[in-house]
């Protein structure tokens, strides 16, 4: 236990919860000056004070005393209103450390098959090259993006962050990756989870030289390139054009929804692709909105889903974060990583880790972990 670790953890957890030093001091039954000295590392807490601080912050004592894994080679851009950036980085670092530790214990590491392509290819060409490298046929939809990434040595880390200011991040090999973390908060659509995974894959392929945790602001050109890559990775142009052509006899909304379900993407991704073509252009957005309004009788509001198309730069022309209104939406079963769960099961069955440790790694209550282990079958 070190004063620097405790102080850093206190500050990180306090800021993530939106609390002041005074708030935590009052909840822990100590003076504000005493708390400030603990957070700055000027003093160390006694055992009873440590327990009181853990209760005040609603965390375990281990969360206060364990030094965190500091990620440096990470691409993490988010909206400025996000106040949990530091906490997210800590959680990703902890999850990644557990993942790598299990792989080492079980001697079961999948070597990454990621090929950084940099700026030598267009985003569409890079998407096609990556699909080919991963063994996906040109006409084949990406049915299971988590399984696809994990089979190619890219770790997938689902996180639940109650904010639409953060969708995902990616970690380079130098920090234990490659890995992609996706915000699977229930108010974000599953379509967005899938798109975020493909978007972060794009950064690993195209922008690996720019992985530095100190960079927080979005770079518009790189974001657009990642969006284009993700769109073409999930919907290759040739097969997209073929499927779109085969729906010519039905109404626009029905065509969009049919193609959306086929490729397991958001309807907005379909509209974005159509808006890129000379045949439709930006007019497609207005036409789609007008047809939805005729069907539902609803006025199109800016932030509604599916009624409005967000003008936000970060989300421009791509899946809306709100899950509630995604038409014909997917279920969480369409985005499930399972490699970490398999490693945990093997480690538990080989007595390499305890059931409690397995619960900790998977982020489950112990009772839920017991129920999970009871359901394991050959």
Image: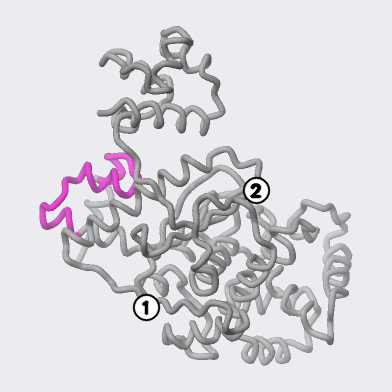
Give the residue displayed 29% in from the left and 56% down from the top: 99
Residue 79: assigned label: 2
- The stretch drawn in magenta includes residue 357: yes
Q: Do the residues labelled 1 and 2 touch (CB within 8 Å)?
A: no
Label 1 or label 2, whichever comes before in sequence order: 2
As drawn, 4 above or below 69:
above
Q: Taken as a whole, is the magenta stretch helix, strand or loop?
A: helix
Query: The magenta stretch spans which residues?
Result: 346-369
Decide: few, some or many residues near mark 1? Use Cα within 10 Å; few <14, some 14-19, many ≥20: some
Q: In which quarter of the image is residue 5?
A: top left
- The stretch drawn in magenta includes residue 230: no
Q: Disc 2 on helix, strand or loop? A: loop
Give the residue displayed 63% in from the left and 52% down from the top: 217
Give the residue displayed 32% in from the left and 25% down from the top: 3
Residue 184: assigned label: none
Decide: few, some or many residues near mark 2? Use Cα within 10 Å; few <14, some 14-19, many ≥20: some
Q: In this view, does 351 lie to the left or right of 191?
A: left
In the rendered view, how is the structure colored?
one colour
Residue 113: assigned label: 1
Q: In which quarter of the image is the C terminus?
A: bottom left
Depth order, front residue of 184/40? 40
Q: Disc 1 on helix, strand or loop? A: loop
């Amino acid at each position: 236990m070190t004063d620097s670790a405790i102080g850093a953890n206190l500050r990180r957890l306090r800021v993530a919860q939106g609390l002041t030093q005074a708030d935590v001091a009052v909840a822990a039954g100590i003076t504000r000056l005493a708390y400030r000295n603990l957070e700055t590392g000027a003093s160390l807490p006694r055992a009873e004070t440590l327990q009181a601080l853990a209760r005040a912050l609603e965390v375990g004592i281990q969360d206060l005393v364990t030094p965190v894994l500091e990620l440096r080679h990470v691409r993490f851009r988010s909206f400025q209103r996000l106040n949990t950036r530091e906490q997210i980085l800590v959680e990703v670092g902890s999850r990644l450390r557990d993942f790598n530790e299990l792989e080492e214990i079980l001697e079961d590491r999948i070597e990454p098959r990621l090929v950084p392509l940099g700026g030598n290819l267009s985003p569409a060409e890079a998407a096609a090259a990556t699909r080919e490298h991963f063994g996906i046929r040109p006409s084949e939809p990406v049915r299971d993006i988590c399984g696809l990434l994990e089979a190619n040595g890219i770790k997938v880390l689902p996180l639940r962050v109650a904010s639409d200011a953060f969708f995902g991040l990616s970690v380079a090999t130098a920090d234990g990756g490659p890995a992609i973390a996706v915000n699977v908060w229930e108010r974000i659509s599953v379509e967005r989870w899938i798109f975020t995974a493909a978007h972060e894959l794009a950064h690993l392929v195209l922008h690996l030289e720019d992985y530095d945790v100190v960079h927080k602001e979005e770079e518009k050109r790189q974001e657009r390139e990642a969006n284009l890559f993700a769109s073409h990775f999930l919907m290759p142009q040739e097969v997209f054009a073929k499927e779109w052509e085969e729906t010519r006899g039905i109404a626009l909304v029905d065509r969009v929804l049919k193609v959306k379900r086929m490729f397991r993407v958001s309807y907005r991704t379909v509209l974005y692709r159509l808006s890129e073509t000379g045949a439709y252009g930006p007019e497609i957005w207005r036409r789609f909105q007008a047809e939805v309004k005729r069907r539902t009788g609803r006025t199109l509001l800016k932030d509604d889903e599916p009624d409005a198309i967000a003008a936000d730069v970060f989300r421009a022309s791509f899946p809306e974060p709100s899950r509630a209104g995604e038409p014909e939406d997917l279920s969480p079963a369409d985005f499930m990583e399972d490699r970490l769960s398999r490693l945990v099961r093997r480690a538990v069955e080989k007595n390499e880790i305890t059931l409690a440790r397995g619960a900790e790694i998977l982020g489950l209550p112990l009772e839920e972990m017991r129920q999970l282990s009871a359901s394991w079958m050959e």
